[in-house]
Amino acid sequence: MTNIFDLKRTTIIDLTHSLEPNIPTWSGENEFEHKNVEYYTKGFLNQVLTIPLGIGTHIDLPAHISSRYKYQGSYDVSTFIAPAYVLDVSRRANEKYLISTKDIENFESFEGKIPPHSIFIAYTGWSKFWNDPQKYCNKNSDGIRHFPSFSIEACELLVERNIQGLGIDALSPDSSDPRFPAHQLMLQNNKFIIENLANCDKLPHKGAWVFILPMNIKYASEAPVRAIGIIQQ
């Protein structure tokens, strides 16, 4: 991270969707409430925010699947700062696309082996539907969602590579499988997951750093994040 804060030589990419009413959510319901409680009546604008922790661009922590695993407060903030490796499958990804071990191996043939403690991000292009929640969530009549996601074999390979965290520009790394295999494998192995990333197309395949900074809630199993990418010139 030499000279990482030399802003004259740095490009900063905002990887975070804005929180506002009617954004895509796992439930499909509007779960965001942001209202004024005092409108400058005492010289200040005071507001209240009511949201679930797993909304918008957010992080899933191991405690999301079991109280036996780590909550937010168990981590040093440095855990969420790491080099990014970005797999672009946007040209071939569709609602049923599963990122495979072949995708990752092809990536490594060009970019080198994914190093330990990095953050691996899949850019699927699905974020283009963010402003159309019905399309973004893509739930069929049986309540099953379909969007690009990860195969369990790809996740096993990434755990073998000992990545720090897994990110995707879709609602989840798990799509139609109700067992949530990507979540189970990643979180059981003390990895975190970042969902609903934005602007991943602006990141290089390697060479950037990402800061995934969650709200500092001690016993949170999920948390909204301000995610940014930093590219040193």
Image (spheres, rainbow, N blue to C red):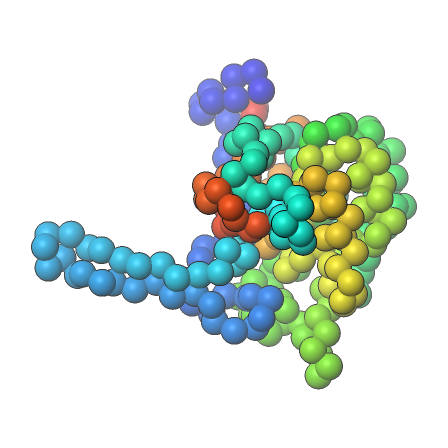
- Tell me where residue 232 appears, x and y as whole percent: 56, 25
Q: Residue at x 73, y 81 (%)?
A: 142
Residue toward you, 76 or 13: 76
Q: Is residue 135 above or below residue 228?
A: below
- Tell me where residue 163 appears, x and y as whole percent: 73, 35
| Quadrant of the rendered image containing residue 177 | bottom right
Residue toward you, 83 or 218: 218
Give the farthest residue toward the bottom: 141
Q: Residue at x 48, y 42 (%)?
A: 218
Is residue 137 visible to us here? yes
Q: Is residue 141 above or below residue 195?
A: below
- Tell me where residue 116 appears, x and y as whole percent: 75, 28
Quadrant of the drawing holding the C terminus:
top right
Is residue 200 visible to us here? no
Residue toward you, 219 or 37: 219
| Quadrant of the rendered image containing residue 120 | top right
Q: Residue at x 56, y 16 (%)?
A: 2
- Tell me where residue 63 appears, x and y as whole percent: 63, 48
Give the farthest residue toward the front: 68
Whether residue 38 sits left or right of residue 21 in the image: it is left
Give the farthest residue toward the top: 2
Q: Residue at x 84, y 44 (%)?
A: 156
Quadrant of the drawing holding the N terminus:
top right
